[in-house]
Image (cartoon, rainbow, N blue to C red):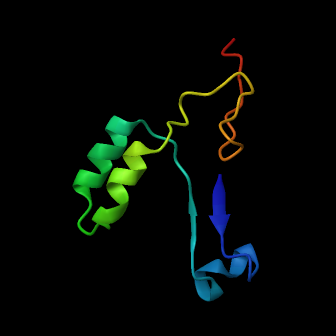
Amino acid sequence: NTYFDCRCEPYDIPTKGEFCGRTQLMSRTALKTFIAKLDNKIIENIQPAFESPSLLNIGDSGTYGASYYLPLVNPN
């Protein structure tokens, strides 16, 4: 669940790349706490983010619209 500037080699990202990062799935409560701590925020995006379907409520197929894959892992 990482993304990076694919216009350059991964080892060139610090000098030639424009972006790289990772996604982190979090609950709505954790997201609200995270947003509250941000210095700069785009407030127009906050309400739609909270109104979007939760990816934590996965259907029988194991995915929600194929937008984020959550494997079914056996804890044992």
Identify the image quadrant of residue 4.
bottom right
Give the quadrant of residue 31. Answer: top left
The answer to whether 44 is drawn above or below residue 32 in the figure is: below
| Position above or below: 31 against 8 | above
In the rendered structure, the answer to whether residue 41 lies left or right of residue 5 reads: left
**x and y, in percent, of residue 36 in the image:** 23, 52
Q: Position of residue 70 (x, y in %)?
A: 67, 34
Say whether residue 67 is left or right of residue 28. right
Q: Quadrant of the C terminus?
A: top right
Q: Between residues 18 and 40, which one lies in front from this camera angle? A: 40
Measuring 29% from the left and 53% from the top, which residue is drawn there?
35
- Number of marks drawn: 0
Most distant residue in the top direction: 76
Q: Position of residue 41 (x, y in %)?
A: 29, 66
| Nearer to us in this view, 69 or 13 | 69
Residue at position x 67%, y 76% from top? Answer: 5
Image vertical order of residue 24 relative to residue 39, above or below: above
The residue located at (51%, 42%) in the rendering is 25
Q: Is residue 53 left or right of residue 66?
A: left
The answer to which quarter of the image holds residue 63 is top right
Say which residue appears at 50% left-offset and 36% top-offset: 54
Q: Nearer the viewer, residue 24 or 41?
A: 41
